[in-house]
Image: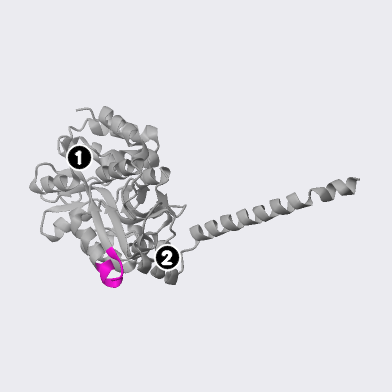
Amino acid sequence: MARAVKWKWLPELCVFAFVLVGCLHVLAQRSLSQTHPMPQEKLLEGAKREGKMVWYSSLNINDSKALLDRFEQKYPFVKTELLRAGAEQLLNRILNENRAGRHLFDAVNLTSITALKKAGLLQPHRSREGSAYPNQFRDSDGYWVTLYNLYTVIGYNTKLVGQGEAPKDWHGLLDPKWRGKIGMDQEEYEWYAGMLDYWGEERARKFMRALSGQNIHWRKGHTLIAQLMAAGEFSVGLVYAHRIESMKRAGAPVDWVKTSDPVMVTLAPIAVAAKASHPNAAKLFMDFSLSKEAQVMLQKVNRISGRLDIEPTVPEMHPSKLKLVAIHPGVAEDLTRYSREFQEIFSR
């Protein structure tokens, strides 16, 4: 009798085992796709069938257009479209389109990329180029890799600041001699958040409160701050290193501090849309954008590449010579908090 009951459930057990094996196979395939790049032949075949790719990017129009033009030259079977906008505007557009059930982009380049990942609007693509980038410049789950980097540093006017007189580190800005001589972006929220994360909140807030007493010159935009600093409106400022290097080559009396700990790095990642209409073309474009060829193109227009096999335009910008600390793109998810704290500390 006991044996009869045991055999009675055999068909159900077989069905269960069949379903379980199928599920495990699907999970294994999905895991494989997330840990290994798609074979190049399959990617090319898929991109040829799709024939199109739409890129949403916060990269300026000239640089993004140059990348797309070279991509089309290399892969003439894919025609591209570009929508270029500021990071905040672009994020809001994508979220609004998603709420409306519209999925119009295939690839995206955005500093606040983690907000899209969290909303389920990205798909993983472990680019074959990803291994050329340090871990802090790519997503551990394989969703994004930084397209280019922005180094926030202390810049100074070499006519107003003598050799050896510039601050050696962030705390050097607290010296009374810099009171009324510092320029900062009025929305330096990501740098603020990164410093809190790296130094610890107590130490960082103490520094920020002290800095707020230095009678800061507030302006909007790092390029403007660099230009005004070069013109002598203030002696030092928080600027982007690549902008200062570009201005130096043009003859401007500016330089930047290489000894800061940390040099905060804002990432500008690229990723593939979860519901891309042209997923293979998007993955092909992501691979191309992260390739050495494309990164050298961006470097020639003063963008900083995260690739380890590309020498910087100036030796001092080599990662081994700077204390680089990436600001995780997830900061954007809590930017309201950081902006509120920043405004409260630097109330003006």
Which disc number belongs to residue 128? Answer: 2
Q: Position of residue 221 (x, y in %)?
A: 18, 44
61 sits to left or right of 33: left
Dot 1 falls on a residue whose secondary structure is strand
Residue beneath disc 1: 184
Tag 2 or tag 1, which sits nearer the N-term? Answer: 2
Is 158 located above or below residue 92 in the figure? below
Dot 2 falls on a residue whose secondary structure is loop
Q: Residue at x 23, y 45 (%)?
A: 167
Q: Nearer the viewer, residue 148 or 227?
A: 148
Q: Nearer the viewer, residue 3 or 259?
A: 3
Image quadrant containing the N terminus: top right
Q: Position of residue 328 (x, y in %)?
A: 38, 46
Please identify the quarter of the rendering in which residue 193 is found: top left
Q: Which residues are magenta?
A: 70-79
Q: Residue at x 23, y 59 (%)?
A: 64
Label 2 CA crowd tier, 10 Å (few <14, some 14–19, many 20+): some
Disc 1 marks a residue whose amino acid type is Met
180 sits to left or right of 88: left
What kind of colouring is applied to the model shown?
A: one colour
| Marks 1 and 2, how far apart at CA | 39 Å
Label 1 CA crowd tier, 10 Å (few <14, some 14–19, many 20+): many
Which disc number belongs to residue 136? Answer: none
Q: Residue at x 82, y 48 (%)?
A: 8
Q: Nearer the viewer, residue 324 or 27?
A: 27
Q: Position of residue 16 (x, y in %)?
A: 70, 51
Tell me, yes or no, whether the highlighted magenta stretch contains residue 99. Answer: no
Closer to the eye: label 1 or 2: 2
State whether residue 102 appears in this view.
Answer: yes
Disc 2 marks a residue whose amino acid type is Arg
